[in-house]
Image (spheres, coloured by chain):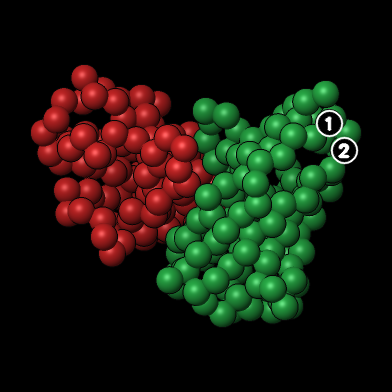
Protein backbone atom coordinates (compact mmCIF):
# COMPACT_ATOMS: atom_id res chain seq x y z
CA UNK A 1 0.00 0.00 0.00
CA UNK A 2 1.14 3.53 -0.75
CA UNK A 3 1.47 5.77 2.31
CA UNK A 4 1.09 9.55 2.13
CA UNK A 5 2.93 11.69 4.67
CA UNK A 6 1.41 15.15 4.82
CA UNK A 7 2.95 18.10 6.66
CA UNK A 8 2.52 20.18 8.61
CA UNK A 9 -0.49 18.87 10.59
CA UNK A 10 -1.46 22.44 11.35
CA UNK A 11 -0.58 25.84 10.01
CA UNK A 12 -1.21 29.35 11.26
CA UNK A 13 -1.32 32.17 8.73
CA UNK A 14 -2.28 35.81 8.45
CA UNK A 15 -4.57 37.09 5.73
CA UNK A 16 -2.52 37.69 2.60
CA UNK A 17 0.19 35.18 3.49
CA UNK A 18 1.40 32.41 1.24
CA UNK A 19 1.21 28.93 2.74
CA UNK A 20 2.53 25.61 1.49
CA UNK A 21 1.58 22.06 2.39
CA UNK A 22 3.60 19.05 1.33
CA UNK A 23 2.81 15.40 0.76
CA UNK A 24 5.40 12.71 0.33
CA UNK A 25 4.39 9.34 -1.07
CA UNK A 26 6.07 6.10 -0.07
CA UNK A 27 6.74 5.45 -3.76
CA UNK A 28 6.51 7.23 -7.10
CA UNK A 29 2.86 8.14 -7.76
CA UNK A 30 3.38 9.52 -11.27
CA UNK A 31 1.71 12.86 -10.49
CA UNK A 32 -1.58 11.19 -9.56
CA UNK A 33 -2.26 13.40 -6.60
CA UNK A 34 -5.33 15.47 -5.82
CA UNK A 35 -5.96 18.07 -3.15
CA UNK A 36 -9.17 18.57 -1.19
CA UNK A 37 -10.48 21.30 1.07
CA UNK A 38 -12.80 20.50 3.96
CA UNK A 39 -14.62 23.05 6.07
CA UNK A 40 -16.12 22.11 9.44
CA UNK A 41 -19.31 20.10 9.11
CA UNK A 42 -18.94 19.80 5.34
CA UNK A 43 -17.81 17.15 2.92
CA UNK A 44 -14.42 17.51 1.27
CA UNK A 45 -14.26 19.50 -1.96
CA UNK A 46 -11.91 18.63 -4.82
CA UNK A 47 -9.65 21.58 -5.64
CA UNK A 48 -6.80 20.20 -7.74
CA UNK A 49 -6.29 17.00 -9.73
CA UNK A 50 -3.23 15.46 -11.37
CA UNK A 51 -0.78 17.52 -9.33
CA UNK A 52 -1.61 20.94 -10.74
CA UNK A 53 -4.89 21.01 -12.69
CA UNK A 54 -7.36 23.31 -11.00
CA UNK A 55 -10.96 22.19 -10.91
CA UNK A 56 -13.63 24.50 -12.26
CA UNK A 57 -14.37 27.05 -9.58
CA UNK A 58 -11.04 26.72 -7.77
CA UNK A 59 -9.54 30.20 -7.32
CA UNK A 60 -6.23 30.84 -9.05
CA UNK A 61 -4.52 31.57 -5.72
CA UNK A 62 -4.45 27.79 -5.22
CA UNK A 63 -1.70 25.85 -6.94
CA UNK A 64 0.00 22.47 -6.91
CA UNK A 65 3.30 21.08 -8.08
CA UNK A 66 5.62 18.12 -7.75
CA UNK A 67 6.69 14.84 -9.24
CA UNK A 68 7.88 11.41 -8.24
CA UNK A 69 7.28 11.07 -4.51
CA UNK A 70 7.19 14.74 -3.48
CA UNK A 71 4.30 17.16 -3.99
CA UNK A 72 3.23 20.53 -2.68
CA UNK A 73 0.07 22.59 -2.50
CA UNK A 74 0.11 26.34 -2.01
CA UNK A 75 -2.30 29.14 -1.31
CA UNK A 76 -1.04 32.59 -2.16
CA UNK A 77 -2.74 35.56 -0.51
CA UNK A 78 -4.70 33.53 2.06
CA UNK A 79 -8.27 34.74 2.43
CA UNK A 80 -10.63 34.14 5.34
CA UNK A 81 -12.67 31.70 3.26
CA UNK A 82 -9.57 29.49 2.94
CA UNK A 83 -9.62 28.58 6.63
CA UNK A 84 -10.22 24.85 6.46
CA UNK A 85 -8.48 21.50 6.53
CA UNK A 86 -6.65 20.28 3.45
CA UNK A 87 -5.96 16.72 2.37
CA UNK A 88 -3.86 15.18 -0.34
CA UNK A 89 -4.94 11.98 -2.07
CA UNK A 90 -2.81 9.66 -4.17
CA UNK A 91 -4.69 7.78 -6.86
CA UNK A 92 -1.88 6.07 -8.71
CA UNK A 93 -2.49 2.76 -6.97
CA UNK A 94 -5.86 2.53 -5.26
CA UNK A 95 -6.41 5.56 -3.05
CA UNK A 96 -4.69 6.89 0.05
CA UNK A 97 -5.27 10.20 1.79
CA UNK A 98 -2.68 12.19 3.66
CA UNK A 99 -3.18 12.96 7.33
CA UNK A 100 -4.51 16.44 6.71
CA UNK A 101 -3.44 20.00 7.47
CA UNK A 102 -5.58 22.37 9.48
CA UNK A 103 -5.14 25.97 8.36
CA UNK A 104 -5.95 28.57 11.01
CA UNK A 105 -5.75 32.33 11.18
CA UNK A 106 -2.89 33.80 13.17
CA UNK B 1 -26.12 18.64 -11.48
CA UNK B 2 -24.69 15.63 -9.68
CA UNK B 3 -26.14 15.11 -6.24
CA UNK B 4 -25.55 12.40 -3.67
CA UNK B 5 -28.07 12.42 -0.84
CA UNK B 6 -27.21 10.28 2.14
CA UNK B 7 -29.40 8.88 4.89
CA UNK B 8 -29.54 10.43 8.33
CA UNK B 9 -27.50 9.85 11.44
CA UNK B 10 -27.67 6.51 13.20
CA UNK B 11 -27.14 5.49 16.82
CA UNK B 12 -26.44 1.78 17.06
CA UNK B 13 -25.40 -0.63 19.77
CA UNK B 14 -22.08 -2.45 19.82
CA UNK B 15 -22.25 -5.73 17.94
CA UNK B 16 -25.14 -4.60 15.77
CA UNK B 17 -25.15 -3.69 12.08
CA UNK B 18 -26.11 -0.49 10.29
CA UNK B 19 -27.10 0.10 6.69
CA UNK B 20 -26.87 3.53 5.14
CA UNK B 21 -27.94 4.84 1.77
CA UNK B 22 -26.72 7.23 -0.90
CA UNK B 23 -29.29 8.33 -3.48
CA UNK B 24 -27.77 9.64 -6.70
CA UNK B 25 -29.30 12.11 -9.11
CA UNK B 26 -28.23 14.31 -11.99
CA UNK B 27 -26.38 11.63 -13.93
CA UNK B 28 -26.69 8.08 -15.21
CA UNK B 29 -26.21 6.05 -12.02
CA UNK B 30 -24.88 2.95 -13.74
CA UNK B 31 -22.04 4.76 -15.52
CA UNK B 32 -19.79 5.64 -12.58
CA UNK B 33 -18.17 3.88 -9.64
CA UNK B 34 -19.44 4.92 -6.22
CA UNK B 35 -16.97 4.83 -3.33
CA UNK B 36 -17.41 5.07 0.41
CA UNK B 37 -15.00 6.99 2.64
CA UNK B 38 -14.71 6.97 6.44
CA UNK B 39 -13.76 9.97 8.56
CA UNK B 40 -13.30 9.33 12.25
CA UNK B 41 -13.81 12.32 14.53
CA UNK B 42 -11.17 14.94 13.90
CA UNK B 43 -9.14 12.57 11.79
CA UNK B 44 -8.26 11.96 8.19
CA UNK B 45 -10.08 10.08 5.48
CA UNK B 46 -9.98 6.39 4.60
CA UNK B 47 -11.24 4.74 1.45
CA UNK B 48 -13.48 1.81 2.35
CA UNK B 49 -14.47 0.39 -1.01
CA UNK B 50 -16.23 0.99 -4.27
CA UNK B 51 -19.05 -0.47 -6.33
CA UNK B 52 -19.87 -0.25 -10.02
CA UNK B 53 -23.66 -0.02 -10.19
CA UNK B 54 -23.96 -1.44 -13.68
CA UNK B 55 -22.48 -4.80 -12.75
CA UNK B 56 -22.35 -4.78 -8.96
CA UNK B 57 -18.59 -5.34 -9.06
CA UNK B 58 -16.84 -4.25 -5.89
CA UNK B 59 -13.32 -3.51 -4.66
CA UNK B 60 -12.36 -3.05 -1.03
CA UNK B 61 -9.62 -1.66 1.12
CA UNK B 62 -8.23 -4.80 2.81
CA UNK B 63 -8.90 -3.18 6.18
CA UNK B 64 -12.64 -3.14 5.57
CA UNK B 65 -13.13 -6.57 4.03
CA UNK B 66 -15.62 -8.41 6.19
CA UNK B 67 -16.71 -5.15 7.82
CA UNK B 68 -18.45 -3.40 4.91
CA UNK B 69 -20.90 -4.73 2.35
CA UNK B 70 -21.73 -2.62 -0.70
CA UNK B 71 -24.88 -2.99 -2.77
CA UNK B 72 -26.96 -0.92 -5.17
CA UNK B 73 -30.57 -0.63 -6.27
CA UNK B 74 -30.49 0.45 -9.89
CA UNK B 75 -34.24 1.08 -9.94
CA UNK B 76 -33.88 3.89 -7.43
CA UNK B 77 -30.29 4.96 -8.22
CA UNK B 78 -29.30 4.26 -4.65
CA UNK B 79 -26.10 2.81 -3.27
CA UNK B 80 -25.97 1.17 0.13
CA UNK B 81 -23.27 0.33 2.62
CA UNK B 82 -23.82 -2.03 5.51
CA UNK B 83 -21.34 -2.18 8.38
CA UNK B 84 -21.42 -5.23 10.60
CA UNK B 85 -20.27 -6.19 14.11
CA UNK B 86 -19.98 -2.56 15.09
CA UNK B 87 -17.55 -1.35 17.74
CA UNK B 88 -16.65 2.11 19.00
CA UNK B 89 -13.94 2.21 16.33
CA UNK B 90 -16.70 2.33 13.72
CA UNK B 91 -18.11 5.59 15.09
CA UNK B 92 -17.44 8.05 12.29
CA UNK B 93 -18.87 10.03 9.43
CA UNK B 94 -19.26 7.98 6.29
CA UNK B 95 -19.34 9.64 2.89
CA UNK B 96 -20.39 8.28 -0.44
CA UNK B 97 -18.48 9.76 -3.34
CA UNK B 98 -18.46 9.53 -7.10
CA UNK B 99 -15.60 9.62 -9.52
CA UNK B 100 -15.34 12.05 -12.41
CA UNK B 101 -13.43 11.40 -15.61
CA UNK B 102 -9.84 10.63 -14.63
CA UNK B 103 -10.16 11.61 -10.96
CA UNK B 104 -11.70 9.85 -7.98
CA UNK B 105 -13.93 11.42 -5.31
CA UNK B 106 -15.04 14.39 -7.36
CA UNK B 107 -18.56 14.49 -5.91
CA UNK B 108 -19.52 13.87 -2.29
CA UNK B 109 -22.63 13.21 -0.30
CA UNK B 110 -23.22 15.20 2.85
CA UNK B 111 -22.12 12.33 5.07
CA UNK B 112 -23.85 9.98 7.51
CA UNK B 113 -22.82 10.10 11.17
CA UNK B 114 -22.74 6.69 12.81
CA UNK B 115 -22.41 6.56 16.59
CA UNK B 116 -21.80 3.20 18.23
CA UNK B 117 -22.83 3.28 21.86
CA UNK B 118 -24.73 1.17 24.34
In the image, the chain rendered in red is: A
Image position of B117 (left or right of B26):
right
Across and down, in percent, residue A27 comes to 49, 47
Is any atom of residue A93 visible in this view? no
State the mark number for residue B16.
2
Residue A29 on image: x %, y %: 45, 54
**Label 1 Cα neighbours within 10 Å, binned few <14 / some 14-19 / many ≥20:** some
**Quadrant of the drawing holding the C terminus of chain A:** top left
- On the picture, is B1 further left or further right than B115? left
Residue at 54% across, 55% down:
B109
Q: Which dot marks residue B13?
A: 1
Give the quarter of the image for residue B30.
bottom right
Give the chain of mark 2. B
- Kindly give the residue lying farthest to the front in the view shown: B8
Q: Residue at x 76, y 30 (%)?
A: B116
Q: Are marks 2 and 1 in contact (CB under 8 Å)?
A: yes
Rendered colour, chain B = green
Expressed as whole percent of the image width and height from the top left, the position of residue A86 reads: 38, 39
At numbered mark 1, what does the secondary structure look like: helix, strand or loop?
A: loop
Amino acid sequence: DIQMTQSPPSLSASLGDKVTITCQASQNINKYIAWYQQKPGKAPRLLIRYTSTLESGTPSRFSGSGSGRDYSFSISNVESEDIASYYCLQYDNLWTFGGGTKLELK
Amino acid sequence: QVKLLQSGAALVKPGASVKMSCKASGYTFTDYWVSWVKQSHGKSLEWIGEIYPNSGATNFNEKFKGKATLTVDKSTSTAYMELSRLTSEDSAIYYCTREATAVPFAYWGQGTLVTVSS
